[in-house]
Image (spheres, rainbow, N blue to C red):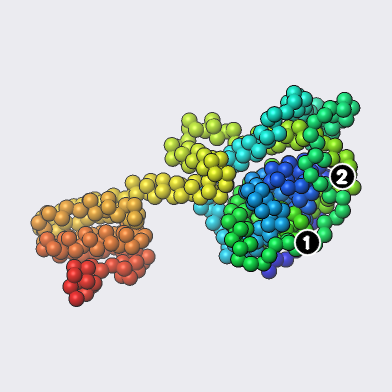
Amino acid sequence: MLLLSKKQDWLGNIRGDLLAGTVVALALIPEAIAFSIIAGVDPKIGLYASFCIAVITAIIGGRPGMISAATGAMALLMVMLVKEHGLQYLLAATLLTGVIQVVFGYLKLGSLMSFVSRSVVTGFVNALAILIFMAQLPELTNVTWHVYAMTAAGLGIIYLFPLIPKIGTSIPSPLICILALTAIAMYFKIDIRTVGDMGELPDTLPIFLWPKVPLNFETLSIILPYAVPLAIVGLLESLMTATIVDELTDTDSDKNRECKAQGIANVGAGLLGGMAGCAMIGQSVINVKSGGRGRLSTLVAGVFLLIMVVFLSDWIKLIPMAALVAVMIMVSIGTFSWGSIRDLKSHPLSTNMIMISTVIVVVWTHNLAYGVFVGVLLGSLFFANKLSHFMYVESEFDEENDTRTYHVVGQVFFNSADKFIDNFDFKEAVEKVVIDLHRAHFWDITAVGALDKAVIKFRREGAEVELIGQNEATSTIIDRFGIHDKPEEIDKIMGGH
């Protein structure tokens, strides 16, 4: 059962959480609007989602101080659904995404993060950065020179403002960028696209809405192919973000509780007219570095965000799109792991291949889940191949007793089974063969099958075979699946009845 966290999570850092939450709320507005535009929906869809997801995860999330809202990773997966079927199907997919995530939480799939290697995480983050940058390109094509000038000016403000002593670090530079470019556009009456041109902004608090879609299998067949990747990508990014915040704050978090909380937050977002979201790596880092540690910082971020957009929507409509493009380019640059390029020279080839493959698949398919799947699969194959190299067999011959003893060392499984077989000399004429398994471990039925093959081959050559030194796990799997000591099973394989 999900319970409210202890008092320390809420009241242990009030001043730091209030300040950090306010900073995050200011930085969330342009990102929520920009992500809405990426997904092809009105800005209010992302803003409502960001409010709802931040508030719910603040209360029941597994990671205090982590910021969850509408994100680029999720928005990128919604584009075709919105384009082909419209907003109502997106809301239905958001609800289903939440339900799937809650189920994942109860199945304790949060622990599966241990299978995602650091190279996959790096590839995931780099691909996300590239996709966010690519999503800005439509705003920079077939436009007047004013747009390029404003975007360049915005990037200049974002990166140069923090260099100003004292004030530069106290106010978020993306906010200064937005205020400055909006003022310039208004003063000089520059005719460029604004947020108001992109869609409707909220002028009221969100209300309960059930998606207007028919409840049948046809609807399910439309939204399920989107909901599953949304659920997986949302949890991947959330759990990766939780791990990063764990390291930054030197604390632990409940990953399975986070799965449930993200799911409930997405159900809430869908019912309040918002899009699916997840934890935000960039905003969570901003929150922690601004002094946010507790749940109060996430709650303040969500509530303050909604208050600002509802009561200041007439001003937000005037923000030039060039300012948001500059902010999103900053997000993509900040998200990309530039150190991973430098590390290509020093890291093993297999690690580099996993990272690069993850990036290529994600950018090619525009689906972060596919990239992570490929990365994990490659990582598993490389690990299995590496592990198989540590399996070897030594042998010694006792002339007095005419006995050949094979000492098996290492892990015997599907990838090392053939190597295990190749180490035996079946043509050697000996009276007895001893296979010593003291320093070996058998993992699967392929390994057991290889042992059966070796024992049966030696017996065909007339040698007596003895197995010694099996540990408990190896003995159990050999007893259960091995056939070399079961004549009736051997007869079946040889064609007898």
- Which percent across, then down, holds residue 462? 11, 63
Label 1, on which residue?
209
Locate the C terminus and report the quarter of the image it occupies.
Answer: bottom left
Q: Which mark is residue 137?
A: none
- Which percent across, then down, holds residue 209? 78, 61
The residue that appears at 77% across and 25% down in the rendered structure is 146
Left or right of residue 171: residue 120: left
Left or right of residue 367: residue 381: left
Left or right of residue 384: residue 373: right
Which residue is at the front of the view, 218 or 263? 218
The residue that appears at 17% across and 60% down in the rendered structure is 457
The residue that appears at 26% across and 61% down in the rendered structure is 451
Label 2, on which residue?
313
User: Please, what is the three-letter code of the amino acid marked with disc 2?
Assistant: Ser
User: Please, what is the three-letter code of the amino acid marked with disc 1?
Assistant: Leu
Looking at the rendered structure, the secondary structure element under dot 2 is helix
Which residue is at the front of the view, 32 or 436? 32
Locate the N terminus and report the quarter of the image it occupies.
Answer: bottom right
Q: CA distance from mark 2 to mark 1?
A: 21 Å
- Which percent across, then down, holds residue 44? 79, 49
- Which percent across, then down, holds residue 320? 80, 34
The total of numbered circles placed on residues is 2
- Which is nearer the N-term, disc 2 or disc 1? 1
The residue that appears at 68% across and 60% down in the rendered structure is 92
